[in-house]
Image (spheres, rainbow, N blue to C red):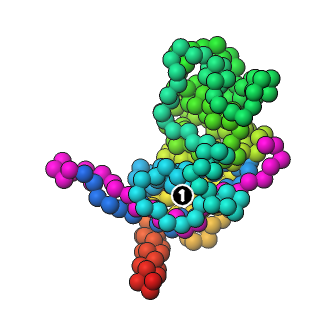
Amino acid sequence: MIGSDYVLEAHNIYHTTEVDTGGCFNGGGQSALVLKGVHLTVHSGEVMAILGSKGSGKRALLDVIARRSEGSSRGQVLLNGSPLTKSLFQQRCGYVTHACDFIPGLTVSQTLNYTPTILGGYLKSSKVRQVLADLALSQVSHKKVENLNISEKRRLAIGVQLVRDPVMLLLDEPTQGLDPLSAYLLISILSNSAKKTGCGILLSMEKPRSDVFPFLDRALFLCLGGAVYSGGTRAMLEYFHGIGFPCPQLENPLMYYLCLSTVDRSGLGDWIKSKQEEQCQGVYQENVKV
């Protein structure tokens, strides 16, 4: 896949689903609009982070892209300009969740070798060895999966997808539960893999550390289901400065703007809400016209 050029695009994504209202006697949740006009673009070899607090819509967006969401969705998800159907996603893309459903008794190497791929024989063995090396799993290749620590299990789950050679890889909170060093290692590995293989990577994060910032090519900030910013990380600081929210020199830009949009310390939350209300009002008017 080296040298290939793929683009994943999501345009004007709206998603409505049932959410838990927290009540003890209501017998279920309520239908709510959890994504509101979200846009994003990821190219081959890039790492894009979806950033937001709990309930911001990160997982819902990944599920919509992967065609595994429950509820009603509107908008376009395209891979190289063609609609990304469920079948196409399963053929060309991968999704890493927190569920590590490995077969007990198998080693790390066996788990990767038994993963169904279009490769066979020497090519398959060569691919497995390469994935083990790229994910820093070579030293535990003969270790049984039930004896792995959380960091090793997370990397093995990623390896199960990478051995299939996806053009786009989605990851739901891959650093959750990891210590700072393991989280740094994981993001650096994903970045190196993206640059080496040309795979585009889209991952969600709730508490991004400053040391992962250099590994992110793009960022999408979500707040209340709407996009605060979607674009390159290099242009991010200039964008927020331009709308009146410069980042202090010693602050972690990722967490600073995430906190601003969530806690609303400097009015950014009100600005976001006004933009979202404008979007929703526009959609309502369009529906009325139709």
Task: Tell me where the magenta segment starts and ends, as one range.
Answer: 1-27
Q: Is residue 197 above or below residue 103?
A: below
Residue 59 seen anywhere in this rendered image of the structure: yes
Q: Quadrant of residue 18?
A: bottom left
Q: What residue is drawn where x is 67% and y is 39%?
A: 190
User: Badge 1 is on which residue?
Assistant: 221
Q: Amino acid at mark 1?
A: Phe
Going 51% across and 55% down the picture, which residue do you hit?
A: 64
| Residue closer to the observer: 55 or 170 | 170
At 77% from the left edge and 23% from the top edge, which residue is drawn?
A: 121
Residue 3 lies in magenta, yes or no? Answer: yes
Using residue 236 as the reference point, say whether residue 223 is left or right of it. left
| Horizontal side of residue 69 vs 209, given as left or right | left
Instruction: Return the x and y of residue 128 as percentages of the image width and height.
Output: 72, 26
Is residue 157 depicted above or below 142 in this figure? Answer: below
The picture places residue 240, in percent across and down from the top left corner, at: 59, 65
Which quarter of the image is occupied by the N terminus? Answer: top right
